[in-house]
Amino acid sequence: MLDFLEINDKNEQILREYYKNCSYGLCEYSLGTKLMWCGTLHPTWTEVAGCLVIRNRINGKIVHDYPVAGPEGDEDAALTAIENDCIEQGIVPVISVVPKCRITELLARYPYVKVSDIRTWRDYVYNSEDLRNFAGRRYSGQRNHIKKFYEACPHAEFRKLTAEDLPLIQQFWEDYDREFAKGDNSMAVQELQIAKRMLRRAGTGDFRCGGIFDGDRLISLSLAEKCGNTLIVHIEKALYSYAGVYPATVQAFARAYGEDVKYINREDDAANKGLRTSKLQYGPAFLAPKYRVEPQNELLSHVHEIPVLTTERLTLDAIREEDIPAYNRLVLDQERNRWWGYDDVAGLGGPVEERSFFDVARRDFENRGAVNFAIRMNGEFIGEAVLYRFNYRGDAELGCRILPEYAGHGYGTEAFSAVADWGLYAVQLNRVVAKCFHENAASYKMLSACMRPAGKDETFCYFEKKV
């Protein structure tokens, strides 16, 4: 499993190195967003195949950002690592806030997928030149507001802010609190507290900060960071008592810090009507979508109940309650199951009870994570075949085990072939895979009879069957 780390002062620079060259242009692909919204997103990170992988836990559900590749990064390998990590945990590998430039790769990657594109997530992205100049008829309103602002405050000027200006920033927040109508908007209050914490980083790292002064009084401020060809503006605040100060700040900040970027991202509107109206008035070049991609396995689409499969000598169907004694004997046979490759008892995570393994098998199918077939001869339970570990890319793994008194008669090969064909032609998988320990001669013989070799490592021999 992947080893994810908390974001802290010691490793911020690692994330910054990835984000500063990231071309996705979305606010989530920035250090500032991870720091500001850590209490909501709960982001953790790791490096895989030269890529930054971020795992977020939102409302108890794990979702991942799309991998951010470094100079030698392999996005495909990073995605595969995310998928494998999620499969080990028994969860779906959800990739969220996927930029438009990467959605095609994911749609081609997953045969079955649920995609959402929520309007309120979209970032407002502007041409840097537009915000620097406010040229043309569509910006006549902004130009008029700015003109009136400077007529009322002829000595107002924009200055860059550094750590030495923290006392002035603190005074700004005191002035802002006196004007800020908190009301019952808990989200606005939370966002304000986050902004206050973030402004302590003014002038540090790659954060660009500045504001407009009326004499010695700071009356507005903004904080941003450059990621690729986009300046991502995390904070824009101003004293409401100064009419026109907001458009004046937007333009001044863009002129001070937007010369080396093509776009300026002023983030989403969080379904706030006032923010949406304001941000649309500045004429965004586009609203950047953020896709949420939730792969689905083939069971969800094609299997509503465990079917009955028949072979020359066997019947395969769902495990029933009357099978529990024989099923428990199969699962708890340690001598035979040392070749199984999975510790069923440890996998329970609790004490073994009479129905434990039966309930796990039933629950796995209800969640469409696996299909456990009972293998029967003349109606008697003699073993099981399990199709599991769906990788969301058209593959699933198949395992089979037989009670000791029925071993050596080819029942495993017969059952295994039947489930493999069912997986390929009824479940519509692209590939069924299997493995066995090098020392397990019986399983090697069985798999060789119905599948093709697909390589080996220090522990296992691998096999596959394709359509």
Image: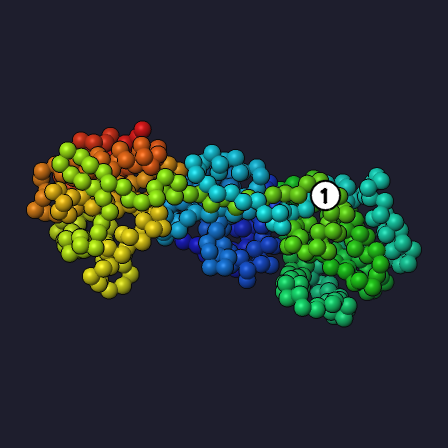
Question: Does residue 301 appear left or right of residue 11 in this picture?
Answer: left
**Which color mode does the image show?**
rainbow
Q: Kindly identify the residue that appears in the image at 53 percent across and 57 percent down.
A: 41
Q: Give the residue furthest to the top.
A: 467
Q: Position of residue 348 (x, y in %)?
A: 27, 59
Please name whichever residue, 79 or 403, is drawn nearer the observer in this view of the structure.
403
Q: Kindly identify the residue that appears in the image at 78 percent across and 44 percent down.
A: 132
Q: Give the residue furthest to the left.
A: 405
Question: Dot 1 lies on which element?
Answer: loop
Q: Position of residue 139 (x, y in %)?
A: 82, 44
Q: Is residue 322 above or below residue 261?
A: below
Q: Quadrant of residue 270?
A: bottom right
Q: Position of residue 78 (x, y in %)?
A: 44, 42
Amino acid type, callout 1:
Pro
**Label 1 Cα crowd, 10 Å radius (few <14 / some 14-19 / many 20+):** many
Q: Is residue 24 above or below residue 335?
A: above
Question: Does residue 240 appear left or right of residue 26 in this picture?
Answer: right
Task: Answer whether residue 374 is visible to the viewer in this image.
Answer: yes
Q: So how many labels did they put on this image?
A: 1
Question: Does residue 269 appear left or right of residue 217 in this picture?
Answer: left
Q: Kindly identify the residue that appears in the image at 44 percent across and 43 percent down.
A: 295
- Residue indicated by mark 1: 284
Q: Which corner quadrant holds the C terminus? A: top left
Q: Position of residue 204 (x, y in %)?
A: 65, 57
Please name whichever residue, 92 or 423, is drawn nearer the observer in this view of the structure.
423
Q: Kindly identify the residue that appears in the image at 66 percent across and 63 percent down.
A: 188
Task: Answer whether residue 455 is visible to the viewer in this image.
Answer: no
